[in-house]
Amino acid sequence: MNTRPQIKLEYGTHRQEEFVLVRFEYIQSLINQLKANFDARWSRSHGCWLIARKDFDLGRFFGSMKELGYIDYSALKINKESAYKSVVKRDYSHRETQKLPNGYLEMLQQKRYSENTIKTYIAYFKDFIYYFNERELAEVNGEEINAYLLELINKWEITISEQNQRINAIKFYYEKVLRKARQVYEIERPRTEKILPDVLSKAEVGSILKATNNIKHKTLLSVIYSCGLRRSELINLKIADVDSKRMMIKITGAKGKKERYVQLSAGLLDLLRLYYSEYKPRIWLFEGQKGGQYTVGSITNVLKTAAHKAGILKRVYPHMLRHSFATHQLEQGVDIRFIQAWLGHESVKTTQRYTHVSEHNFKNFKNPLDELL
C-alpha cells in the first residue's frame, strides 16, 4: 500500500485567471520543494497552492516532486486541444506498415501470452517505435520514455488501463527481448479505479431466459450464467468438456491459461440435451452457422436482443451474467472461497468485490429515513 503523501493536481480559476491547483497536507518539505522549483503561491480561498496554468509543465512537476509524494493527476484535462479533441482522432495508419523488432512477436508467443494481449502489445509498441522512428530503440532512455507517456496523458487523456498496457508493452521489449535490467519508470502507475460490477437480479435473468425462444440462444445464455463464464471460456467449450456422469463441465482456454471444473446443474443438462438433439454440434459446444467456434460478437448480440425483448432498459452485456451469478451465489450463502475457485480468480480479493453489490449485506440494515417519512 502506498503510504507516501498524496499530491493532487486539478485545474481551476482564481480572479479570472487559469491555474493548476496543487493540494497536499501541510508538510514543510513538500512546500519547500514546490516553492524552490515553481512560481507557486498560496490561496486562502482555495485552500491550496496555485501555479499559473500557462507556466505549468506536468513532466517537470513529476521530475521535481515524485520523490516526495504520490502525484494524482487524474483530474487534469488536456489544455487547448480539448475544444476540438472530440473531432480529432488519433491516426493509427502507421500500424499497418510499421515493422516490429526481431524477437518481439516471437517472445510474446514463446511466453504464451493470450491472443488479445499479443494484439494489444503489438499495437502499442508499434506506436512507440513510430514515435522514436529516427532513433535506435536500444538507445532510448528512461527519461525519454517518461516524456512519451506524459505526452499521451496530456494530449489524449489515455485511460488508466491503456497507460498500464502501454508501459507493459514497452517494458516487455527492453526487459524480455533485449534482456535489460528491470526499469521502474518515473511515471507512476495510477491507482486502479474501484469499479463495482454491474449486476442483474434473479428476476431479470429469468425474464431474459424466458424471452429467448431460440433453444440454442437460450442454452448459450444459460451456460454463461449457470457456470459463471467469460465469453472466451464459452466459445472454447467442446462437447467432450461436458461430463454428465460427474455433473461437471471442464473449462479450458481460461484467463491465465488455467483450467478448472464447474458444476453442471440438472436443469442445464436437460437444456443441453434438447439443444444437442436439435443442432447436433460436431466439436465445439456452440458453433456458428457455417461451423467452427461461435463468435464473441454473436454472444453479445444474442444477449442484447433477449434483454430488449424482456423489457430491460439498462445496458446489458455478457460479462454481466458472470457478475450476476457470483453475486447470487454470495446472496445464497455460498462461501466466497468456493465462488473464487468457481470463477477462476487467482486472488480472493477479486471475488470480494461482489460483497459490495450483494443484497445480503443490507438485509438487516434499517434505513433511518423509513422512520421519518
Image (tube, helix red, strand yellow):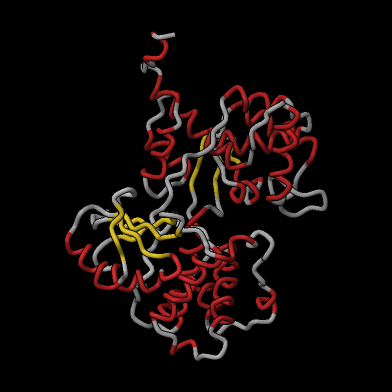
Q: Is residue 156 above or below residue 178?
A: above
- Whole-percent x, y for residue 270 in the image: 67, 28
Q: Residue at x 54, y 33 (%)?
A: 199
Residue 271 in the image: x percent, y percent?
69, 30
In front here: 105 or 49?
49
Q: Residue at x 54, y 75 (%)?
A: 125
Determine whether 202 is above or below 239 in the image.
above
* Residue at the front extreme of this rendering: 15
Marker count (numbered): 0
Q: Is residue 304 above or below residue 150?
A: above
Near-viewer residue (288 or 281): 288
Visible residue check, residue 114: yes
**365 over 75 or under it: above or below:** above
Q: Quadrant of the C terminus?
A: top left
Question: 120 left or right of 146?
Answer: right
Q: Is residue 246 visible?
A: no
Q: Residue at x 40, y 36 (%)?
A: 338
Residue 189, picture quadrant: bottom left
Give residue 299's position: percent from left, percent from top: 70, 44
Name which residue lies at 49% across and 87% down.
137
In front: 199, or 279?
A: 199
Outermost left residue: 28
Q: Residue 305 placed where, x, y %?
A: 75, 36
